[in-house]
Amino acid sequence: MAFLCLMCGVFALSGQDKKPADTRTSDQQVQAPPEEDEGEKPKEYSFNPLQANKEMTVGTFYFHKGDFRAAAVRFTEATRWNPTSADAYFLLGEAEEKQRAWNSAREAYQKFLDLASDDKRAPEVRKKVEKLSKGKH
Protein backbone atom coordinates (compact mmCIF):
# COMPACT_ATOMS: atom_id res chain seq x y z
CA MET A 1 0.00 0.00 0.00
CA ALA A 2 2.87 2.38 0.87
CA PHE A 3 4.42 1.66 -2.50
CA LEU A 4 1.18 2.60 -4.25
CA CYS A 5 0.97 5.90 -2.33
CA LEU A 6 4.60 6.62 -3.13
CA MET A 7 4.02 6.01 -6.83
CA CYS A 8 0.96 8.29 -6.85
CA GLY A 9 3.06 11.04 -5.30
CA VAL A 10 5.78 10.60 -7.93
CA PHE A 11 3.31 10.87 -10.79
CA ALA A 12 1.64 13.89 -9.22
CA LEU A 13 5.00 15.66 -8.85
CA SER A 14 6.16 14.81 -12.36
CA GLY A 15 3.44 16.96 -13.86
CA GLN A 16 4.60 19.96 -11.83
CA ASP A 17 8.11 20.04 -13.31
CA LYS A 18 6.98 21.80 -16.48
CA LYS A 19 7.73 25.53 -16.49
CA PRO A 20 5.90 28.02 -18.67
CA ALA A 21 7.77 29.13 -21.76
CA ASP A 22 9.74 32.34 -21.40
CA THR A 23 8.04 34.87 -23.64
CA ARG A 24 10.34 37.81 -22.92
CA THR A 25 12.48 39.30 -25.66
CA SER A 26 16.27 39.26 -25.42
CA ASP A 27 16.24 42.83 -24.05
CA GLN A 28 14.08 41.72 -21.16
CA GLN A 29 16.12 38.66 -20.17
CA VAL A 30 16.98 38.55 -16.50
CA GLN A 31 20.66 38.14 -15.75
CA ALA A 32 21.72 35.46 -13.32
CA PRO A 33 22.69 36.70 -9.86
CA PRO A 34 26.41 36.84 -9.09
CA GLU A 35 28.00 33.60 -7.98
CA GLU A 36 27.62 33.17 -4.25
CA ASP A 37 29.72 30.04 -3.87
CA GLU A 38 33.04 31.10 -2.38
CA GLY A 39 34.75 28.09 -3.96
CA GLU A 40 34.04 29.42 -7.43
CA LYS A 41 35.71 32.76 -6.90
CA PRO A 42 39.36 33.06 -7.93
CA LYS A 43 41.70 33.03 -4.98
CA GLU A 44 43.12 36.41 -4.07
CA TYR A 45 46.70 36.52 -2.84
CA SER A 46 48.37 39.14 -0.74
CA PHE A 47 51.80 39.16 0.81
CA ASN A 48 51.66 36.55 3.57
CA PRO A 49 55.04 35.01 4.46
CA LEU A 50 53.50 32.82 7.18
CA GLN A 51 51.16 31.16 4.69
CA ALA A 52 54.06 30.86 2.24
CA ASN A 53 56.12 29.05 4.89
CA LYS A 54 53.23 26.66 5.56
CA GLU A 55 52.99 25.90 1.83
CA MET A 56 56.76 25.36 1.71
CA THR A 57 56.60 22.91 4.63
CA VAL A 58 53.83 20.88 3.04
CA GLY A 59 55.54 21.04 -0.35
CA THR A 60 58.79 19.77 1.16
CA PHE A 61 56.89 16.89 2.75
CA TYR A 62 55.42 15.92 -0.63
CA PHE A 63 58.79 16.35 -2.34
CA HIS A 64 60.50 13.94 0.08
CA LYS A 65 57.58 11.56 -0.29
CA GLY A 66 58.15 11.55 -4.08
CA ASP A 67 54.89 13.27 -5.03
CA PHE A 68 56.50 15.96 -7.16
CA ARG A 69 53.24 17.18 -8.69
CA ALA A 70 51.74 17.94 -5.27
CA ALA A 71 55.03 19.51 -4.19
CA ALA A 72 55.03 21.78 -7.25
CA VAL A 73 51.47 22.88 -6.49
CA ARG A 74 52.46 23.81 -2.93
CA PHE A 75 55.63 25.60 -3.99
CA THR A 76 53.64 27.55 -6.58
CA GLU A 77 51.21 28.57 -3.85
CA ALA A 78 54.17 29.67 -1.73
CA THR A 79 55.41 31.91 -4.57
CA ARG A 80 51.97 33.50 -4.79
CA TRP A 81 51.84 34.24 -1.07
CA ASN A 82 55.42 35.52 -1.08
CA PRO A 83 56.68 36.41 -4.56
CA THR A 84 60.07 37.40 -3.12
CA SER A 85 60.84 33.93 -1.74
CA ALA A 86 63.87 32.69 -3.65
CA ASP A 87 63.71 29.36 -1.81
CA ALA A 88 60.16 28.76 -3.05
CA TYR A 89 61.26 29.31 -6.65
CA PHE A 90 64.30 27.08 -6.20
CA LEU A 91 62.21 24.23 -4.81
CA LEU A 92 59.56 24.78 -7.48
CA GLY A 93 62.29 24.42 -10.09
CA GLU A 94 63.47 21.19 -8.47
CA ALA A 95 59.92 19.76 -8.39
CA GLU A 96 59.23 20.75 -12.00
CA GLU A 97 62.54 19.25 -13.10
CA LYS A 98 61.66 15.95 -11.38
CA GLN A 99 58.43 15.94 -13.40
CA ARG A 100 60.35 16.65 -16.60
CA ALA A 101 58.50 19.96 -17.03
CA TRP A 102 61.60 21.57 -18.47
CA ASN A 103 60.17 24.99 -19.38
CA SER A 104 58.50 25.44 -16.01
CA ALA A 105 61.67 24.36 -14.24
CA ARG A 106 63.77 26.82 -16.26
CA GLU A 107 61.33 29.67 -15.49
CA ALA A 108 61.36 28.90 -11.77
CA TYR A 109 65.14 28.67 -11.69
CA GLN A 110 65.42 31.95 -13.61
CA LYS A 111 63.14 33.66 -11.12
CA PHE A 112 65.33 32.25 -8.32
CA LEU A 113 68.39 33.81 -9.98
CA ASP A 114 66.57 37.13 -10.38
CA LEU A 115 65.83 37.16 -6.65
CA ALA A 116 69.04 35.65 -5.26
CA SER A 117 71.87 36.02 -7.74
CA ASP A 118 74.42 35.98 -4.90
CA ASP A 119 73.06 32.79 -3.27
CA LYS A 120 75.54 29.93 -2.86
CA ARG A 121 73.30 27.76 -5.09
CA ALA A 122 73.35 30.35 -7.91
CA PRO A 123 76.27 28.86 -9.91
CA GLU A 124 74.61 25.44 -9.93
CA VAL A 125 71.26 26.97 -10.91
CA ARG A 126 72.86 29.01 -13.72
CA LYS A 127 74.21 25.77 -15.18
CA LYS A 128 70.76 24.20 -14.94
CA VAL A 129 69.13 27.19 -16.66
CA GLU A 130 71.72 27.08 -19.44
CA LYS A 131 71.24 23.34 -19.86
CA LEU A 132 67.44 23.64 -19.89
CA SER A 133 67.58 26.58 -22.32
CA LYS A 134 69.60 24.54 -24.79
CA GLY A 135 67.16 21.66 -24.54
CA LYS A 136 69.68 19.31 -22.94
CA HIS A 137 67.86 17.38 -20.26
Image (cartoon, rainbow, N blue to C red):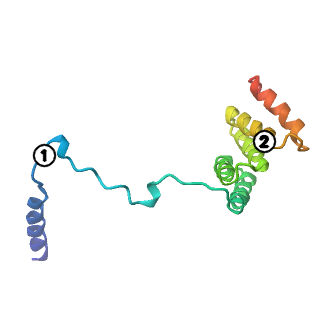
- Mark 1 to mark 2: distance in Å? 57 Å
**Which class describes the residues within 10 Å of circle 2: few (<14), some (14-19), or many (20+)?**
many
Asked whether 27 or 132 is in front, the reply is 27
Image spot of residue 56 (x, y percent): 72, 56
Asked whether 54 or 64 is in front, the reply is 54
Asked if disc 1 and disc 2 are in contact, CB closer than 8 Å, the reply is: no
Q: Residue furthest right?
A: 120
Horizontal side of residue 84 vs 36, given as left or right = right
Quadrant housing residue 40: bottom left
Reply above or below: 110 against 88. Answer: above
Q: Quadrant of the C terminus?
A: top right
The amino acid type found where label 2 is placed reads: Phe
Horizontal side of residue 135 vs 1, given as left or right = right
The amino acid type found where label 1 is placed reads: Arg
Image spot of residue 34 (x, y percent): 35, 55
Asked whether 126 or 113 is in front, the reply is 113
Which residue is rendered at x = 68% and y = 32% of the image? 103
Which residue is rendered at x = 69% and y = 35% of the image? 100
Which residue is rendered at x = 89% and y = 36% of the image? 123
| Marker disc for residue 112 | 2
Image spot of residue 74 (x, y percent): 66, 53
**Which class describes the residues within 10 Å of circle 1: few (<14), some (14-19), or many (20+)?**
few
- The number of numbered discs placed on residues in the rendered structure image is 2
Asked whether 132 or 126 is in front, the reply is 126
Label 2 sits on a secondary structure element that is helix
Horizontal side of residue 37 vs 44, given as left or right = left
Q: Which residue is mark 1?
A: 24
Image spot of residue 110 (x, y percent): 76, 36
